[in-house]
Image (cartoon, rainbow, N blue to C red):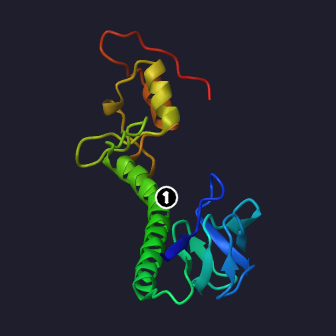
Amino acid sequence: MATIIEMPKLSDTMTTGKIISWLKKEGDAIESGEAIAEVETDKATMELEVFEDGVLLKILAEKDSDAPIGAALAILGEEGEDITGLMEQAKSQTGEASVAEKQEEKEKVEEAPSTAAEAAGAAAAAPKQPPSSPAAKEEDGRIRISPVAQRIAAEKNVEIRLIQGSGPGGRIVKRDVEEFLEKGGVKPGAAPAPAAAP
């Protein structure tokens, strides 16, 4: 009875094999254990052996072609045997193998961008942290102040809402805080402090 010879898994990491050459041709008698082709894997070139006697009725994979594991490579049987049914099976088998291979590649390609997209999505979903220094007097009541001015105001216990900013867009700058301190402006209950050294 005719059988399909499939691409075997010749190494642990192998997914496809390349037919380097056919050692037998159609019509040749084959003995069990005999090599019929040379296959290049991801690691080495190895011989493809068959494990039953018969005649090489049909070669399905061309020389220099890549075939995934499980793809039909050839049909072995008795001379003159009808292999029409096996030919159809081999075609669908090769089709299924290539579809599975393409799907695997597609998943690998999609995996990387989706991971990046997930990271971007997580960043977008995370609540935005307010800036460490309040940003300038805006309509929502927040105060625009430079980091240096904010630090001095914090050290000197200054109520920044009482300071009139002279920077761009009403931004409170270091000079404004120092002038406010020179005029003795501090929080209620706190002793006036001398201006910070520039």
Residue 95 falls in image quadrant: bottom left
> How many residues crowd mark 1 within 10 Å: few (<14), some (14–19), many (20+)?
few
Disc 1 residue type (three-letter): Ala
Residue 197, placed above or below residue 109: above
Residue at image location 50% in from the left, 67% down from the top:
105
Give above or below for 191 relative to 172: above
Query: Could one spot residue 38 in this view of the protein?
Result: no
Query: What residue did someone put label 1 on?
Result: 112
* Residue at the image point whose x is 67% and y is 74% from the top: 18
Q: Is residue 30 left or right of residue 184?
A: right
Q: Nearer the viewer, residue 123 or 93?
A: 93
Q: Position of residue 145 (x, y in %)?
A: 42, 39
Q: How many marks?
A: 1
Whole-percent x, y for residue 152 in the image: 50, 26
Residue 19 at x, y percent in the picture: 68, 76
Q: With respect to residue 95, does 39 lie above or below?
A: above
* Point 30% across, 14% down: residue: 188
Which quadrant is home to the C terminus?
top right
Residue 7: x and y in percent read 58, 68
The secondary structure type at the circle numbered 1 is helix
In the drawing, does residue 95 fall left or right of residue 76?
left
Would you identify the image quadrant in which residue 85 lies?
bottom left
Q: Is residue 78 above or below residue 69?
A: below
Can residue 51 be seen here? The reply is: yes
Residue 74 or residue 137, whichever sits in front: 74
Query: 140 and 173: which one is in front?
Result: 140
